[in-house]
Amino acid sequence: MPRERRSARCSHCREQGHNIASCEIYKIKINSALASGNNNLNIDGLKINNFVSNINLDHIVRLNLLYRGLLPYITRFNYQIFYNRLEQKFVYIKKTHEYIKEINKITKGPSDTSDISIKTKRNYKIRLKYYRENSMWSSYINFDDLMDIFNNDYIEVTTRLNNARVAREAEYQQYLQQRDVERAQILQREAEANLIINRIELPILRTDEVAADDCPICMETLGETNKSVLRCGHSLCTSCLLTQTLRGVALKSTSSCFCTVCRAPYL
């Protein structure tokens, strides 16, 4: 029999039936952190464009009013939310859908259309808009910095983040330039090596050796083995041939690779 497939388990609340992306209490806690500036979730980074498009600014406004003591409690999903001022933390109590529906009828405090709610929401929009329009790579932000944008000097935070990102981009561009230079040097060395390896072979000018007792370069006596016969028939010692050839390699030119007697090139 096929094994029964287990349902998903949320990595935050540890309940089965959903994952962290759809976890209701996790979303509430994220909004609570933004509304109050207290991060107890240890979130490292967040794609702000995707996140802001999914959050409810009206809910953050209500959480902020709750945090400021302007509301006794609020509701979200099947949770009734309080703020404990002694312990300085939000309290989330899960209730039934019917209970949430009933207490919403008697909730007192500023509504979503009140002046303070509209002003708070407008303030959040201004902060997010400024960050998006004045920051490089605004699609990614550390969650603590996002809380600072919501609760502190958003202009200073945006400037600091943008300066750091500009410096990081300049460093990255410098790395790319250095990498391109190194790649070009490698290609140049490979091309030079291929130029020597795949060089055009010069034709033999003479089939017999020109008799000689001494090397025309160092004037040392040529032996039977320590000599090389060039295509022109003239001979020189192997040491001088290697020295002359390596000089040409160092100069990246074959202009020095020639017979010192008749000036015929051998490379």
Image (cartoon, grey):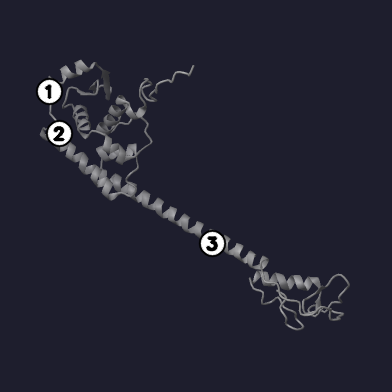
Is 37 above or below relative to 186?
above
- The quadrant of the picture occupied by the C terminus is bottom right
Taking depth in this image into account, of 41 and 97 the one nearest to the observer is 97
Residue displayed at 32% across by 47% down:
160
| Tag shown at residue 30 | none
Q: Secondary structure at mark 3?
A: helix
Q: Position of residue 180 (x, y in %)?
A: 50, 59
Residue at point 13% right, 20% down?
105
Residue 218 position within the rendered picture, expressed as x and y whole percent measured from the top left: 80, 77
Position of residue 94 in the picture relative to residue 12 (left or right) = left
As helix, strand or loop, the secondary structure at mark 1 comes to loop
> What residue did someone put label 1 on?
108
Amino acid type of the residue that numbered disc 1 sits on in the rendered structure: Lys
Residue of label 2: 117
* Residue drawn at point x = 25 percent, y = 31 percent: 36
* Amino acid of disc 3: Ala
- Residue 212 position within the rendered picture, expressed as x and y whole percent measured from the top left: 86, 81
Disc with the residue nearer the chain's start (3 vs 2): 2
Disc 2 packing (10 Å; few <14; some 14–19; many ≥20): some
Residue 184: assigned label: 3
Along the viewing direction, whichever of 63 and 163 lies nearer the viewer: 63
On the question of residue 123 being in view, the answer is yes
Say what secondary structure mark 2 lies in. helix
Residue 206 % position (x, y):
79, 80
